[in-house]
Image (cartoon, coloured by chain):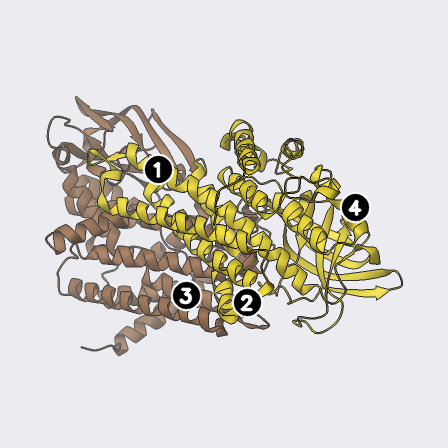
Chain colours: A brown, B yellow
Amino acid sequence: MDLTFSPEEEAFRQEVRAFIADAKTKLPKGIGAAESADRSKEDYLAWHKLLYRKGWVAPLWPKQYGGTGWNVTQRYIFNEETAAADMPTTLPFGLNMVAPVIFTYGNEEQKKKYLPRILSGEDWWCQGYSEPGSGSDLASLRTRAVREGDHYIVNGQKTWTTLAQFADMIFCLVRTDPNVKQQEGITFLLIDMKTPGITVKPIIVLDGAHEVNEVFFDNVKVPVANRVGDENKGWTYAKFLLVNERSGIAGVARSKKAVERLKEIAGAETLDGSPLIGDEDFARKVADLEIDLAALEFTELRTLAQEARGQMAGPESSILKIRGTEIQQRITELTVEAIGYFAYPNERALGHNDNVGPDYALGQAGHYFNMRKTSIYGGSNEIQRNIIAKAVLGL
Amino acid sequence: MDFSYTEEQTLLRNSVAKYLADNYKFETWRKFTRSEAGRDPNHWKQFAELGLLAAALPEEHGGLGGGVVESSVIMEEFGRALVVEPYLPTVVIGGGFLKHGGSDALKEEWLAKIGAGESILAFAFAEPKGRYNLADLTTTAKKQGGSYILNGQKAVVIGAPWADHLIVTARTSGGQRDKNGISVFIVDKKAKGVATRDYPTVDSLRASEVTFENVEVPAANLIGTADNGLPLIEQVVDEAIAAVCAEATGAMKVLVDTTVEYSKTRKQFGVPIGKFQVLQHRMVDMFVQYEQSVSITLMVTLKLAEEAAERAKAASAAKVTIGKAGRFVGQQAVQIHGGIGMTDELNVGHYFKRLTLIDTLFGNTDHHLKRYAALS
């Protein structure tokens, strides 16, 4: 066991840093990681495209499809450095969600058609999983697909579809057999968002952002060639995707950066003329948070080490989702506490994002409200606890 | 011992509740809070006509002779309907300062006007660097002949865009955080040298950053005694804390009820989610926290008349309880509603936001824990 990095790994770190320094000069201003809502499609894709040109956009893919071929340590270093430098994140829906399904279960034609376009950022994907009546109970989904010759005719509704307003493609779970056990009648379809019959309707969330949508399907014709794997076997692929979704969800590197920012804010804020960070009560809370985060970091590293030995992450990856999101939420709570009365101004409603208080207070309350989603999405934290209870503890 | 409300107090509650149920529905609230004005001034007129604004004011100045219990009843009902109208800054705080500290002339001039809905006040006390310390003041008022000259900056003055006058705390002598040397003034917002920058708040109120540049305030507008304003400020802020605690219990009640109701109708895995024990216990905890909040709000309301240290302890105890309960109830209401709880369209998130900002107002949980410990 060893905590140090090899000279090769240190050299890789330097390479990543150099790349980031250069990328910073090329990115549009103000699109750092501090989640600013209502970005344009181009803003979202700017970082993706720089990574693509460097060949670094898909750390999770096998090399043969255009992945980086990095080992676990390199991925860890890359995440650390990009988070520390406040770089944006790439959107997960294409790269980390549907692509692994396609290269694991898709046919050659699908791999050839979709993977390069995901890599380049040409196709923007969104996720058609949740429905109004099917959230935690995803397998109860009712969006119906009926086979007619070479096509499926899709009718129904998806919801909470993140950034569907920009999407070229949606991967969808649809019901192809309503007469069997729920999990056995689901099919995984890739659907072009330009197909007639698809309507996208915005949902505005607590911080005022247009982040999610409802997607309606009215007699949407989808070629059978767009089906991944076998008909009625979609639940297998869906679960595979969910486990992948969870493994990245801990967000340790990003949280470390956010804690650093919290400490900067608490250093700039004052209590009776002294920095808030020096206040014993506040300092204890920050310390508690950092300790939780350190434990989570080593939980994630253990998972990665296991992966490096060729063992796939199992149901215990739910720990990463639970603790990762709880810590992310705690950071935003303490940040709101730190800024005191400057939690009040709603700059979004001012229209120009002009800040009322100090720069660092801008949008922090909204961010706190927004981050409540993390214990709901990707399988709510209640569902994650059910998974651990059942699949790990055998209860 | 008797915790029952008088007949008049029950009538007051029913009349507020009925007016709000009939006229202050969430859908119209969503519209007027997003309008240019941020509120519908007609409600203020109706509040005056219903006697709400005069309920807690003294009879000799046109009030109905009630007090903190009446304000508490009104604020609790306001909390249930997410009322944005400036009852707290105008009646509880403005009325409180004038009642406890105003000269006879000021009482004569202001209290009847407040009760009749003819004036709206805002409380300019917080400063950009002062956090929750009421005595941490850089705003100065210098005596000059028959006037005071006011200079400084106030942050997040809630309700200021709607106000005609401001209650301002300022330093008339001493150093930045001295407990002595503080005075309170009522200042015309239209006075020369008053500048405001107005904005909406995340909990759908309106607020302003206010700067005073050589603003001339007649010495007659001093509330209480010069240099010894802090005890008065603490008294009125403790009363305001009791009022926002009541507001918070109203908001929590809606969240508890709405969440329980939703859990009975929302089905997943073939059963209403309220059948899952993990959610049952969570909702029980929400309910327990709500009940504890109601209790401590009652305690502070009944102790507002006690001597300063006892009153202050009660106010801080209540603020801590409400801060913790509001966070838990708000977060869990969103969590149990799931995605729909995250939407702007549903009322749940708006109650959660109000409760979050109530924790900040007049000092958060940490601040009041410290204050309580220091008084114990």
Whether the residues at callouts 2 and 3 have beta carbons within 8 Å, the answer is no
- Which structural element holds mark 1? loop
What's the chain of the residue with tag 3? A
Nearest to N terminus: mark 1 or mark 2: 1
Q: Which residue does the numbered mark 4 point to in the structure image?
A: B108
Marks 1, 2 in one chain: yes
- Which structural element holds mark 2? loop
Marks 2, 4 in one chain: no
Q: Which mark is residue A168?
A: 1
Whether the residues at callouts 3 and 4 have beta carbons within 8 Å, the answer is no
> In the figure, B135 relative to B167: above or below?
below
Residue A390 located left or right of residue B354:
left
Spot occupied by residue B23 in the image (x, y as percentages of width and height): 56, 28
Q: Which residue does the numbered mark 3 point to in the structure image?
A: A259
> In the figure, A170 relative to A388: above or below?
above
The reply to whether residue B367 is in sight is: yes
Amino acid type of the residue that numbered disc 1 sits on in the rendered structure: Asp
Spot occupied by residue B191 in the image (x, y as percentages of width and height): 81, 50
Q: CA distance from mark 2 to mark 3?
A: 15 Å
Which is in the foreground here, disc 1 or disc 4? 4
Amino acid type of the residue that numbered disc 4 sits on in the rendered structure: Glu
10 Å crowding of disc 4: few (<14), some (14-19), many (20+): some
Q: CA distance from mark 2 to mark 4?
A: 42 Å
> In the figure, B185 relative to A148: above or below?
below
Whether the residues at callouts 1 and 2 have beta carbons within 8 Å, the answer is no
Residue B151 located left or right of residue A62:
right
Spot occupied by residue B72 in the image (x, y as percentages of width and height): 55, 45
Marks 2, 3 in one chain: yes
Nearest to N terminus: mark 2 or mark 3: 3
